[in-house]
Every structure is written in C-alpha cells, then in structure tokens.
Image: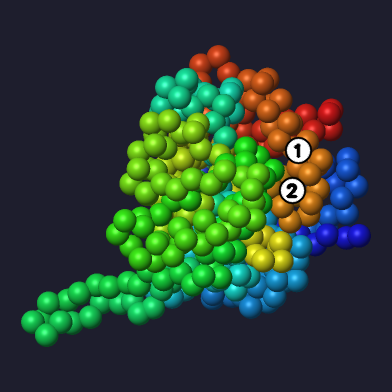
C-alpha cells in the first residue's frame, strides 16, 4: 500500500537538510519496501514569496490527506519585518493547529560518541535517553481571554489565561503512558500544582490514568524542581509529560544536555496518528547555503516518522543504527566536530548514512 509523505523543506538550511533525509528515506524504502510516495510543497518564507501567505490552503489540504509530513524549518531575516499575521512562523502554528497536532514528542538522546559535546560532565549525561511529551495545542499559549488592556488608573496590563480541559489532559497523558510502555516504563508528570489550580486538575487526571497502566510507574514533580533535576541528574527520567509552556522550556533545556541542536528530532502527533516531523532547530540563516548544516536531526525525524506514523519499526531502527555507525566512523558535521574526527558536509553526511543503511 502506498504511503503519502508531504515534504515541506521550508527556509534557510531547510532544503539542504531535508534533501538528505529524503535520500535516506528512499534508501529505506528500497531496502524495506515501504511504498513511500513523496510530494513536495512550500511553507514559511518560501510560501510567502510564492503565495503571499506562509501556508497555502492547498498545502494544508495535502498535508491533512497524507500519512505524514516531513518538514525542514521556517523563517529568516528576509521575512522578519513582515506583519506578524503573515510571518513564516504563522505557517507552523497554523499547520499544528489545523492538523490537531496536540502531542509533541522530543527525545533527548546523547549518542555515546558525542558525550564530550555536552556542557555537563560525561558521567552525568552518558547514555542519556529522555522523551519529553509536551502538550502542544492548549494551555496558556492558546487560552482566552488574552491581550493587553488599559486599567482605570491609565496603566496597561498584560494578561493570558492558563486553561486545560479534562479531555486535553487525558489524551496527552495517554500518549505519555503508551510511550513509556515501549521504553523504561516510567512517567514523570511535571506541574505546578502547589500554585496553579489548572495543574491540580492535571495531576488528578494523571493519577486516575495511571490505574489503566499498572506496568508504568507514575511520579510527579513541580516544574522548578524538574528544571533543576534535568541539569543535576537527568538520567533519572524516562518519559516526562507536561503542558505547553513548561514543555517548551524543559525540552530546550533537555536539548542542550545532548550538546548539539543539530542532532535533535521531534514529532508532533494528532489523534489519528498522522504527524508532522521536524528537527528541533530553526532555519539557521547564518549557515544557510554553505552545505555545512548537520542533517542528522532531520534524518532522525524521518526515522521517528517511520516509527510513529507509518508503524515501520524495523526501518526506523535501521536508520538509527546507520546514524550510530556513521558517528562511530568519526564523521562529524561542523557543529559536532572535535579534534581527531573527520569533518564532512551536509551532503557527505547524508550519503554516509545511506551507505551505512544499505550495508546493514
Ligand atoms: P536556529 O536553531 O536556526 O540556530 C541556532 C544556532 O544553531 C545557529 O548558530 C545555527 O547555525 C545553529 N544550527 C541550527 N541548526 C543547525 C544544524 N542543523 N547544523 C548546524 N548548526 C545548526 O535558531 P535561531 O537562529 O534562533 O533562528 C533562526 C530562524 O529559525 C528564525 O527565523 C527563527 O524564527 C526560526 N526558527 C524556526 C523553527 C522551526 O521552523 N521549527 C524553530 C526555531 C527557530
């Protein structure tokens, strides 16, 4: 059966890194007979230049009809001065919202070969393998009312609303428990229930969900402590589940534990399993067009796509093994380069992963 993948390279380094990920997917398709069919379209600044909007409705419809979407990244100085309503980032928010991508999965894995790249001591991070499950379409980033209002005394006041309905907490909680079942069987739910009522409800729902997953150990942590524990003893975590804003901050912290943003993939899933897969990093305009960007975060995003949206676990695993083999060989893009390793370009890194995959 054919599986439709929409490819959205985006801006900056997006087209360079996505091209390598597509080559790896094509090699996986050949090897494992996955039946992949690719269709490319525009998002972000590239879409603004072509259509005047960062995500055309026709592109959105294509994505909704696909089995999965693989994206590069959006944005860049060329579009920074545009009106906020049509900035490249709006395309990303629109696709997340319109496709109902409520679950953001961000693994923070430290490849042993890159232990020196972390800002923490190797013994604290070696073997790190955390999955952060962040709620993506609710919470304070979307809550109404919001705005900046004028008070009677003439002073302005900014306000936002932090809301979560029970069903929103339950569906993200279930994703976290299901993921934990396939990993280390531990979920840590992060909240601020000593101060915020919305997270009192969050904690209550997580506790009631835990009854359906007796094989998974549930713990709770306040967000301030979680931030501290992530840099003190990150290996205590398996799956972390949290709301939109806390997840935004904690996932960037966890990302830095691994040393390079060029290595980190992400997945955003809807309730029917369709997903958007993209590297954690942005469009890196400072290095765009130079052929030096690290394509591994996008290649690993493609592997997550095979695992979570297409259920092709064997092919997904093979890509991860191939990436490990390339790192074993000492091949490094500029962002992860250290003395004694071999510096390679974006295309050389992609070709090396294809070669390692074909040789498995
Ligand atoms: P960035 O992630 O693009 O870059 C931060 C630093 O990391 C830069 O020095 C860059 O060269 C480096 N870097 C990033 N990815 C790399 C890779 N694959 N290989 C090697 N080095 C890499 O963040 P920024 O500079 O804050 O943002 C640049 C643009 O990207 C902005 O327009 C921003 O809005 C956009 N952005 C988009 C997304 C997205 O599309 N999801 C996410 C974050 C930022």
Residue that appears at 65% across and 56% down:
212
Q: Secondary structure at mark 1?
A: helix
- Taking the spot 41% from the left edge, 26% from the top edge, the residue there is 120
For mark 2, what is the residue? 307
Estimate how packed mark 1 is, as few (under 14), some (14 to 19) or many (20 or more) residues with alpha carbons within 10 Å: some
The structure residue drawn at horizontal position 49% and vertical position 45%, both measured from the top left corner, is 219
Is 282 placed above or below 115 here?
below
Neighbours of disc 2 within 10 Å: few (<14), some (14-19), many (20+): some
Sequence-wise, which precedes: disc 1 or disc 2?
Answer: 2
The x and y percentages for residue 137 are 51, 67
Q: Nearer the viewer, residue 193 or 115?
A: 193
User: Residue 56 at what x, y percent from top left?
Assistant: 61, 75
Q: Residue furthest left?
A: 153
Quadrant in the picture for the C terminus: top right
Q: Which residue is mark 1?
A: 317
Can I make out residue 258 in this image? yes
Q: Are marks 1 and 2 in contact (CB under 8 Å)?
A: yes
- The residue shown at (71%, 25%) is 325
Residue 26 shows in this picture? no
Left or right side of 2 for 169: left
* Residue 338 x/y as whole percent: 51, 21
The residue closer to the viewer here, 102 or 59, is 102
Residue 94 location, quadrant:
bottom right
Q: CA distance from mark 1 to mark 2?
A: 8 Å
Furthest residue in direction top, as rendered = 340
**Which quadrant holds residue 200?**
bottom left
Classify residue 349 by image quadrant.
Answer: top right
């Amino acid at each position: 059966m054919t599986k439709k993948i929409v490819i959205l390279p985006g801006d900056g380094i997006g087209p360079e890194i996505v091209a390598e990920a597509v080559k790896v997917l094509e090699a996986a398709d050949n090897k494992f007979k996955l039946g992949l069919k690719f269709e490319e379209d525009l998002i972000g600044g590239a879409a603004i230049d072509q259509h005047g909007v960062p995500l055309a409705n026709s592109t959105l419809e294509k994505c909704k009809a696909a089995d999965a979407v693989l994206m590069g990244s959006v944005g860049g100085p060329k579009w920074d001065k545009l009106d906020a309503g049509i900035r490249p980032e709006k395309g990303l928010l629109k696709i997340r919202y319109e496709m109902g991508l409520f679950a953001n999965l961000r693994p923070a894995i430290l490849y042993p070969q890159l232990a020196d790249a972390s800002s923490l001591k190797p013994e604290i991070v070696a073997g790190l393998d955390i999955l952060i499950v962040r709620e993506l379409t609710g919470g304070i980033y979307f809550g109404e009312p919001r705005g900046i209002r004028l008070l009677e005394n003439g002073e302005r006041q900014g306000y936002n609303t932090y809301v979560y309905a029970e069903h929103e907490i339950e569906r993200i909680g279930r994703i976290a428990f299901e993921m934990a079942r396939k990993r280390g069987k531990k979920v840590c739910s992060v909240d601020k229930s000593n101060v915020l009522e919305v997270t009192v409800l969050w904690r209550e729902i997580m506790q009631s969900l835990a009854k359906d997953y007796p094989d998974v150990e549930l713990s709770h942590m306040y967000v301030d402590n979680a931030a501290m524990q992530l840099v003190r003893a990150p290996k205590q975590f398996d799956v972390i589940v949290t709301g939109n804003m806390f997840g935004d901050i904690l996932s960037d912290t966890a990302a830095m534990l691994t040393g390079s943003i060029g290595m980190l993939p992400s997945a955003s899933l809807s309730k029917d399993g369709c997903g958007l897969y993209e590297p954690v990093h942005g469009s890196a305009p400072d290095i765009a067009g130079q052929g030096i960007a690290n394509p591994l975060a996008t290649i690993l995003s493609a592997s997550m796509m095979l695992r979570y949206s297409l259920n092709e676990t064997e092919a997904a695993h093979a890509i991860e093994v191939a990436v490990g083999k390339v790192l074993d060989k000492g091949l490094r893009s500029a962002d992860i380069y250290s003395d004694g390793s071999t510096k390679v370009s974006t295309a050389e890194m992609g070709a090396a992963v294809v070669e390692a995959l074909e040789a498995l």
